Amino acid sequence: MAGKFIPARPSPAYIIAILCVGMLAFGGLRDPFTISLPLSGLRKPGEEDGKMKVAVGEGHNEVMTWVAKWGKGVTLVHYDSHPDMAVPNLPKGVWEDVMEGREGWEEKADWFVDIADWILPLVFSKTVSTVVWVAPEWSFQFQEGSYNVTIHGTPPGNIRFEVHPNTHQEYWESLGLMGKPSVTIDSRRTEFTFIVQKTAGDIPVAGEYVIDVDEDYVVCDNPVVRGLVGLVGEETAEGLG
């Protein structure tokens, strides 16, 4: 789909997709399908309602294979309580297929990715050029903002994430991946734009984009607060969170 902006909170169109994800336990749909929806938030004034291609999966990592087949250089708008931006443990040969964007790389990588690390193969393969994470208010794994990210090196070898503007990003720092390498590790560079947004409002996108919605975006609460409730009571825990 082409468009200039999407709402920062799911419209009824996206809620339908969320409910479909939840239905999988009862034998819901798994194959991609097309559905006609009133996409008022995705169209320009005067344009008619369009069609949205929808895929439903039980494991969030299943999204990787669909996105790989749907476009190249697209923006991924990721509604989720978690960023899913870790580096997967792929065999060296599979990483080579990913980095070169060889046909069928996604089918090979699908055997090894999980729900926390399925996005970066899309970045390394140049399938996705921009990742927009629409994060919950309580998450501080990444600071809110727009960043140009350079990944130095080639996995599964030593890699480092260099972020501009230079800011503290707890998620990659906790994995020991932040910062420009002090020694030359590999001449390969992978660049992408990473946007983290929590506040209400429109998210600017250019060209083709894919909307990815994890149902936990609307059902998960702050795990820190939830863990404290049993210790200090709900009122105190909410204040601490």
Image (tube, rainbow, N blue to C red):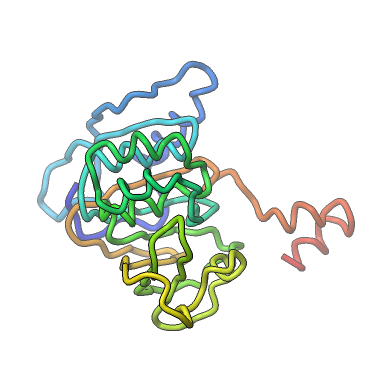
Q: Residue at x 61, y 47 (%)?
A: 220
For this rendering, which residue is in front, 77 or 233? 77
* Nearer to the camera, 85 or 90: 90
Q: Which residue appears at 30% of the width and 42% of the height?
A: 67
Percent coordinates x, y for residue 189 in the rendering: 31, 69
In the image, residue 157 lies at what x, y percent? 46, 60
Left of 57 or right of it: where is 237?
Answer: right
User: Residue at horizontal 37%, vertical 43%?
Assistant: 94
Q: Is residue 25 above or below residue 65?
A: above
- Residue 122 in percent (x, y) is at 33, 50
Q: Nearer the viewer, residue 147 or 14?
A: 147
The reply, left or right, for residue 218 in relation to residue 1 is right
Residue shown at the point (25%, 35%) measured from the top left:
53
Using the image, determine if residue 34 lies above or below residue 80: above
Point out the residue furthest to the right here: 231
Q: Identify the image quadrant of residue 174.
A: bottom right
Quadrant where the C terminus is found in the figure: bottom right
What is the x, y in percent for residue 238?
A: 75, 62
Nearest the eye: 110 or 229: 110
